Amino acid sequence: MKKFILLFIFVFSLTSIKAQDSVSNWKNGGALGLNFTQVALSNWAGGGKSTIALTGLMNLFANYSDSNAVWDNSLDIGYGVTKLDKEDFRKSDDKIIFITKFGYRATSNLNYSALLDFRTQFNRGYNFDKLDPITNEYLLISDFMSPGYLNVSIGMSYKPVDYLQIMLSPISNRLIIVLNDSLSKKGSYGVAPGDKIKSELGSALNIIFKKEVFENVNVESRLNLFGAFEYIPSMVVNWNTLINMKINSFLSASLALDAIYDEKIIMVRDDGSKGPATQFRNVLALGFSYKF
């Protein structure tokens, strides 16, 4: 599966570059970013610890449009590691998000639409505050395709302006995938203990905002709401926002914001209690970037 993901990224990149050089109905491009931070302390009276942080971001898109059809594709990848003093490198960011949406025009602003939304991560994740009682190692809490989420939706898409799309899907199927054996046996992420896949039928709402709000400041925000018929009115929320600020041809600043809520994900909250909680993540980076 990992080889398939890497192959897809390679083919997607080649397709984007090739399409840019030809006159067609395709609009392609993307952005690459690499950010590095180091803090070195020695006999520092103010306290603190030496730190090294490295974060990479990649965003690719390939969109097709003609008089009858619209096909939008995007691939967002992020990975980061941090080393605090003498500790080993630990993961700070890890995501793979691929979204493809096809629409057939009903009116100038309305499309009959079908959407596929796939999300997972590259590497294993650990709870560094807790040891596994069996292995006496840090507790494993996630892995590649553990979880993996695959949403397939059909419905109507409304685009009142170029930078805003709203898709309402009365029928949507969400697959929760946990391929790691140890996590599957625990029943992690809402799958039944021992199962690898859980299927949920429900409805979904997707909102996409993508615009240059100021000169050299681009905002892309995606809100995904899913409600399983079995658990209504409980909603699964995924909200991803990326703000890119261009400094010059090769330097930029970016702010990635992610918010997730899913009642089936049980965790130890910041106050020590156990249960579902709203998850927040933000990644602020300044470094090398290349946009094409």
Image: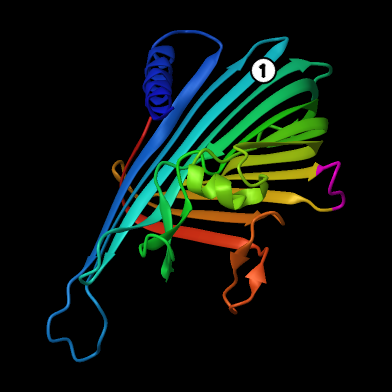
| Residue in the image at 49% along x and 48% along y | 182
Percent from the top left, x then y, of residue 157?
78, 28
Percent from the top left, x then y, of residue 113?
75, 22
In this picture, which residue range is highlighted in magenta?
Answer: 228-233
Q: From the viewer's perspective, is residue 145 above or below residue 246?
A: above
Q: How is the image coloured?
A: rainbow
Percent from the top left, x then y, of residue 263?
72, 57
Q: From the viewer's perspective, is residue 39 above or below residue 181?
A: below
Q: From the viewer's perspective, is residue 77 above or below residue 66?
A: below
Amino acid type, mark 1: Val
> Which residue is most to the bottom?
45
Q: Report crowding for label 1: few under 14, some 14 to 19, many 20 or more residues within 10 A (C-alpha).
A: some
Quarter of the figure that contains the N terminus: top left
| Residue in the image at 12% along x and 86% along y | 43
| Residue in the image at 83% along x and 30% along y | 171
Is-magenta flag for residue 193? no
Question: On the rendered structure, is 142 left or right of 202?
Answer: left
Res. 215 visible in picture: no
Q: Secondary structure at mark 1?
A: strand
Which residue occupies the foreground of this view, 170 or 232?
232
Res. 42 visible in picture: yes
Which residue occupies the foreground of this view, 239 or 263?
263
Q: Label 1 belongs to which residue?
A: 70
Question: On the rendered structure, is 189 left or right of 74?
Answer: right
